[in-house]
Image: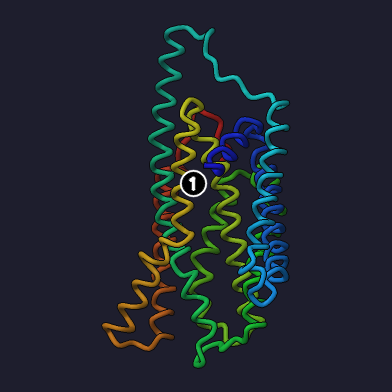
């Protein structure tokens, strides 16, 4: 629920010209907070005592209350954009409603392409952790594994802060295609990374692809969504993005890997590589759908391509 509220609020207080820059900056802060939170939680864990005593949960709850209080105070002084159409003539209202209907159909195609991309890109998140630990593969230690995963977040932070202005200048389309290309290529390179430094670089680029797509994708969604249905349609966007936080791995990645290992009898290393290949194909298919149904359109509502 809070995600929908945040998304709607961001749309209300930003303009098309500034949205990409602001969202990029916020994603940078979110990535930084994620890293700090992970380090802080590891310190509070204290060999299980922080979890058993509830210290971690108490601190998180307090921070959430502080955040909610700050948002309540700030929202009272915010000036929201008016969506009233009182001065429009009958003909102008009909044309306006027609554009809104067209935008809503376009938004449905956008969500369909995004769903395919998210299912493909996020389906390998869990098995990647198993892949880099395989003895006949990278055989990464716990410290090396932490280094690889940290570069994903660092890559995302860099992308969020660097590409925010670029999306507003050269157009969201070009920037999101850059992210989608990286999302399709990086899984194919996991198998050739035989050293930790190389895998660290590749996985960092994958982090760039994810945060680029999320930053620009959210801005595109805001550009398309009709104002009078903003809350409802942004909730659908958040639902599609949430697929990447578990269901994608369960429904696609882990399922494909288990079928290959348990039924077809393939080695885990080969099964994981095949799943990475499948992930890339799904991202490519979603990108093609996006290019055909979204990128080629010239929407009446300002949409910077």
Q: Residue 160 at what x, y percent from top left?
A: 67, 54
- Position above or below: 158 against 225: below
**Residue 96, above or below 238:** above
Quadrant where the image shows the C terminus: top right
Q: Is residue 132 above or below residue 111?
A: below
Residue 70 position within the rendered picture, expressed as x and y whole percent measured from the top left: 72, 38
- Residue 60 x/y as whole percent: 66, 55
Label 1, residues with CA under 10 Å away: few <14, some 14-19, many ≥20: some
Residue at 44% x, 51% y is 114
Q: Considering the numbered disc 1 on the image, is that residue within a helix, a strand or a loop?
A: helix
Side of 243 where 23 appears, left or right = right
Q: Is residue 129 left or right of residue 33?
A: left
Q: Residue furthest front?
A: 53
Q: Residue furthest left?
A: 263
Residue 165 in the image: x percent, y percent? 70, 46
- In the displayed orientation, state which residue is furthest to the bottom: 136
Q: Could you say which is closer to the camera, residue 226 or residue 285?
A: 226
Rendered image quadrant of residue 90: top left
Q: Which residue is mark 1?
A: 238
Identity of the residue drawn at 72% across and 58% down? 32
Q: Nearer the viewer, residue 144 or 293?
A: 144
Residue 291, placed above or below residue 260: above
The residue shown at (50%, 35%) is: 224
Is any part of residue 169 visible from this angle? no
């Amino acid at each position: 629920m809070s995600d929908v509220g945040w998304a709607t609020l961001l749309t209300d207080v930003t303009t098309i010209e500034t949205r990409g820059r602001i969202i990029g900056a916020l994603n940078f802060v979110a990535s930084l907070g994620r890293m700090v939170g992970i380090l802080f939680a590891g310190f509070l864990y204290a060999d299980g005592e922080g979890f058993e005593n509830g210290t971690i949960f108490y601190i998180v709850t307090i921070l959430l209350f502080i955040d909610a209080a700050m948002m309540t105070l700030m929202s009272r002084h915010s000036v929201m954009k008016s969506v009233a159409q009182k001065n429009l003539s009958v003909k102008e209202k009909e044309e306006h409603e027609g554009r809104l209907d067209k935008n809503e159909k376009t938004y449905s195609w956008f969500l369909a392409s995004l769903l395919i991309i998210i299912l493909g890109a996020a389906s390998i998140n869990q098995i990647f952790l198993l892949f880099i630990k395989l003895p006949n593969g990278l055989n990464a230690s716990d410290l090396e594994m932490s280094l690889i995963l940290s570069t994903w977040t660092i890559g995302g932070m860099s992308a969020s802060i660097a590409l925010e202005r670029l999306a507003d200048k050269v157009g969201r389309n070009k920037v999101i295609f850059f992210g989608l290309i990286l999302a399709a290529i990086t899984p194919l390179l996991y198998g050739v990374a035989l050293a930790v430094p190389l895998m660290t670089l590749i996985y960092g680029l994958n982090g760039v692809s994810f945060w680029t797509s999320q930053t620009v994708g959210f801005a595109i969604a805001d550009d398309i969504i009709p104002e009078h249905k903003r809350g409802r349609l942004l909730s659908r966007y958040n639902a599609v993005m949430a697929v990447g936080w578990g269901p994608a791995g369960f429904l696609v990645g882990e399922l494909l890997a288990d079928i290959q290992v348990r039924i077809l009898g393939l080695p885990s290393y080969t099964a994981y590589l095949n799943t990475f290949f499948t992930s890339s194909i799904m991202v490519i298919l979603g990108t093609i759908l996006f290019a055909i149904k979204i990128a080629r359109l010239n929407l009446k509502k300002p949409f910077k391509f």
